[in-house]
Amino acid sequence: MALIKQALISVSDKSGIVEFALQLKEFGVTIISTGGTASLLRKNGIDVIEVADYTGYPEMLDGRVKTLNPKIHGGLLGLRNNEAHMAKMKEHDIDLIDMAVVNLYPFEETVAKEDVTLEDAMENIDIGGPTMLRSAAKNFRDVTVVVDSADYESVIDEMKSANGAVSYETNFSLAKKVFQHTSKYDGAITSYLTSLSDNSGEGTRAEYPGVITLQYKKVRDMRYGENPHQTSAFYVENGSEEPSVSNSRKLQGKELSFNNVIDLNAAIELAKEFSETTAVIIKHTNPCGVATDNDSLVDAYKKARDCDPLSAFGGVIGFNRSVCAQTAEEIVSTFVEAVIAPGFDDDAVEIFKEKKNVRLIEIPLLSGYEQTGYDLKRVVGGLLVQGRDTKKIDINSLKVVSKRRPSVDEIKAMDFAWKICKHVKSNAIVYAEKDRTVGIGAGQMSRVDSSKIAILKARSPVKGTVMASDAFFPFRDGIDAAAAAGATAVIQPGGSIRDGEIIAAANEHNMAMIFTGVRHFKH
């Protein structure tokens, strides 16, 4: 156990620091502090020793140098069980520092500002803070280091139970947190500097930095990976606030598998596309049924399930509304793996208890968030990085290329089908009505095969539906297949060298056709 007699406090984020320092004082801890932190503590009646008085050197160079001193780092790094260290410290009048409470200048917040200059960014690179943190964390056996204000309470609680001391286990845990934090901090600096477009540092920022540093925290080991012979773990991105499976909580059910997480992500990302009450059913990352309803979640779910009930068996369900008891009753009438939604009514949770293995995953409400971040794809020895496919279209402003203009219902159906097509593995074909999918063809090597499979899988008549394609048609055969099945309209990106033939085929079949100018490949 490390007894805390002297603490160094220097924080940029001052939340909770006054209360923490007051508690330290109750244990008789001497506090050394710097600048603004010392001033705040004094204003609240807490005696502190200024770093300048402690080291005998004033803060200098506009505050760039204040804690870079042997009396600070010797006090943090000296090994208590090393006689030579203790003798050398005594020779140079260096006292032990048993606790460091430090957090850093807000570099990431600074560089996130649109008008940030290189000078502003450089001034917000903390030097003394990371150095103190690393010194204290390196010597965690003897020094308690606190970088996160969320740990103040637990540290005080432990000191209360241990007569002012902190355990080895706690110090080690806090030290690990420090190195995670400083690694992320250094990564943010590297990413910012390597994103500047020229060596003057005054150019525009590149969309992708020269070096990308990513940090994810492990939240759990999985039972296995995609297959039982593969090991796996689930990591989440630090600071992500967008509603997702990564910041969800499990209300009941077995532990999530590797494949569950992937399918839950696919389900909720598709559900986010809609403002209407929506149900999504996913099987092996592809939607096998999607439907909307004006206000009834259970009706949306029934319509989605009816698209392909065989595939829906054992699937993962996503909703963009809280799940009510009526919907829960319908879900438990068959076998499903998991349900993800922004809430579950109490009555619904009780009903799901009948199926205790069904995973219920609750995410934050689907409002007030921004879709940000990278889309990452790992290859052996490398990483592909791209922006997320968040592109949306205004269906009413798109180009009608056929002789016949689509009807109001066809436009609604094309808008619906296009949103779904974006989430189907390429080559993707979706047949749909204005509020439900009828047939989905996914992941085929030829587009016409996807079209035929979508027709084959349809349980309801394809006649009167619209067809959406994630990419242009290289030949007219896909249009001919859709027309033969009874589809009346097509929405697709356009851009083929044979667009003229494709449009002519649509006109021959009296089909309406819209070009979006946007492709939605999903590999």
Image (cartoon, rainbow, N blue to C red):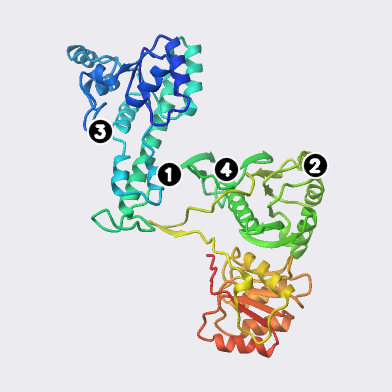
Q: Answer with mark 4 or mark 2, whichever residue precedes in sequence.
A: 4
Question: Which x, y percent locates residue 84?
Answer: 20, 15
Asked if the residues shown at circle 3 and circle 1 are in contact, with their CB atoms under 8 angstroms apart, the answer is no
Label 2 neighbour load within 10 Å: few <14, some 14-19, many 20+: some
Residue 465, label in figure: none
Q: Dot 2: what SS?
A: helix
Residue at position x 67%, y 57% in the image: 275
Residue at position x 54%, y 44% in the image: 241
Q: Dot 4: what SS?
A: helix
Task: Indicate the amino acid at tag 4.
Answer: Asn
Residue 351, label in figure: 2
Q: Dot 3: what SS?
A: loop
Question: Which x, y percent locates residue 63?
Answer: 26, 31
Task: Indicate the amino acid at tag 2.
Answer: Ile
Relative to 129, 311 lies left or right:
right
Relative to 79, 258 lies left or right:
right
Task: Indicate the amino acid at tag 3.
Answer: Arg
Label 4 neighbour load within 10 Å: few <14, some 14-19, many 20+: some
Q: Answer with mark 2 or mark 3, whichever residue precedes in sequence.
A: 3
Question: Which residue corresponds to mark 1?
Answer: 215
Residue 247, label in figure: 4
Label 3 neighbour load within 10 Å: few <14, some 14-19, many 20+: few
Question: Which residue corresponds to mark 3?
Answer: 64
Work out how far the residue at label 1 is from the one at label 4, CA to CA, in angstroms.
16 Å
| Quarter of the figure that contains the N terminus | top left
Instruction: Determine if residue 431 is in view.
Output: no
Label 1 neighbour load within 10 Å: few <14, some 14-19, many 20+: some
Work out how far the residue at label 3 is from the one at label 1, CA to CA, in angstroms.
28 Å
Q: Answer with mark 3 or mark 1, whichever residue precedes in sequence.
A: 3
